[in-house]
Image: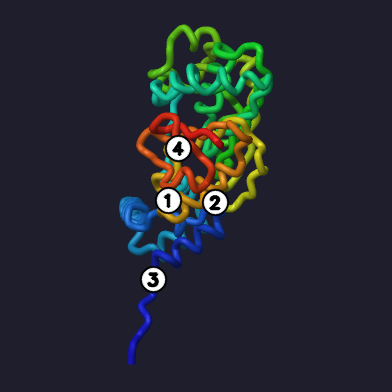
């Protein structure tokens, strides 16, 4: 007689989905499971079952885990070479329409969205720009709305641009009012939400899908392509790729930029 083996990791993932609304089974299992088991062990948990029980009772412990698994790594002007391409090759073409509606998908604490707002003000000052930032982590959205960044967040940013678009505050740097008026934030789940059909001229989804399974990644890219208006652009991470761009109506213009046909 065969005996079914209980999958404690799957049980743990189901518990996290109920607690925090994050479906960890959509992520690459190997690397995510190793990360969680190591983190739980360092927190003194004897098993994933015991760790899940702790998370149900201790919000601080749950927040610590969410910080670990949602990979909130960002900074102003992260990957400067990408921003240079956006500045020279993407924004001027989009600005010909007079209005740019952009989406920072998986925006973390807002550094990408405010960088885009600053680059737009410098590159296409005559265009009306509207930027939406979404992230699954409500704590990051609350932080993004504060528009405050550390000095270290600006380590890759052009000093002149920081001086023009950010002001010094006790905690570091705050986006100036004109940038804050351009950007709004809300919580959103890229794996579950329905995206507006042809709702954006520009979508940035960088350094997000590397943690997803291939099937989940490809489905997300197809839905992001559907959210682009004709001739809009999708910008992904420099180490990422769209598997079959032509199949979802995209044309590669650079290794990390795709245009909607």
Residue density around tag 2, few if under 14, some if 14–19, many if 20 or more, within 10 Å: some
Place of residue 43 in the rendered image (x, y in percent of width and height, measured from the top left): 35, 52
Query: Is the C-beta separation of discs 3 and 4 under 8 Å?
Result: no
Q: Is residue 124 above or below residue 50?
A: above
State which mark lies toward you, 2 or 4. 2
Question: Would you name the residue on which mark 2 appears?
Answer: 191
N-terminal-most mark, 1 or 3: 3
Question: Would you name the residue on which mark 3 appears?
Answer: 7
Q: Secondary structure at mark 2?
A: loop
State which mark lies toward you, 3 or 2. 2
Q: Quadrant of the C terminus?
A: top right
Left or right side of 8 for 133: right
At 54% across and 29% down in the image, what residue appears? 110
Q: Dividing the picture into quarters, in which one does residue 185 lie?
A: top right
Question: Would you name the residue on which mark 1 appears?
Answer: 212
Number of marks in picture: 4
């Amino acid at each position: 007689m065969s005996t079914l083996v209980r999958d404690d990791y799957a049980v743990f993932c189901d518990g996290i989905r109920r607690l925090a609304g994050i479906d960890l089974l959509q992520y690459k299992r190997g690397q995510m499971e190793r990360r969680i088991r190591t983190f739980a062990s360092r927190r003194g948990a004897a098993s994933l079952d015991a760790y899940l029980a702790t998370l149900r009772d201790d919000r601080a412990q749950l927040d610590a885990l969410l910080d670990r698994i949602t990979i909130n790594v960002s900074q102003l002007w992260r990957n400067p070479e990408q921003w240079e391409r956006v500045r020279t090759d993407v924004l001027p073409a989009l600005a010909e329409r007079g209005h740019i509606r952009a989406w920072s998908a998986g925006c973390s604490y807002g550094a990408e969205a405010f960088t885009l707002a600053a680059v737009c003000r410098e590159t296409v000052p005559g265009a009306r720009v509207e930027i939406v930032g979404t992230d699954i982590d409500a704590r990051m959205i609350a932080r993004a709305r504060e528009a405050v960044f550390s000095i270290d967040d600006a380590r890759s940013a052009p000093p002149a641009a920081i001086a023009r678009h950010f002001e010094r505050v006790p905690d570091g740097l705050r986006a100036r009012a004109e940038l804050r008026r351009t950007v709004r934030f809300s919580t959103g789940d890229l794996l579950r939400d329905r995206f507006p059909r042809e709702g954006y001229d520009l979508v940035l989804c960088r350094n997000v899908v590397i943690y997803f399974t291939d099937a989940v990644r490809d489905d997300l890219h197809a839905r992001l392509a559907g959210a682009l208006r004709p001739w809009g652009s999708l910008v992904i991470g420099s180490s990422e790729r769209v598997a079959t761009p032509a199949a979802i109506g995209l044309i590669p213009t650079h290794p990390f930029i795709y245009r909607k046909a």
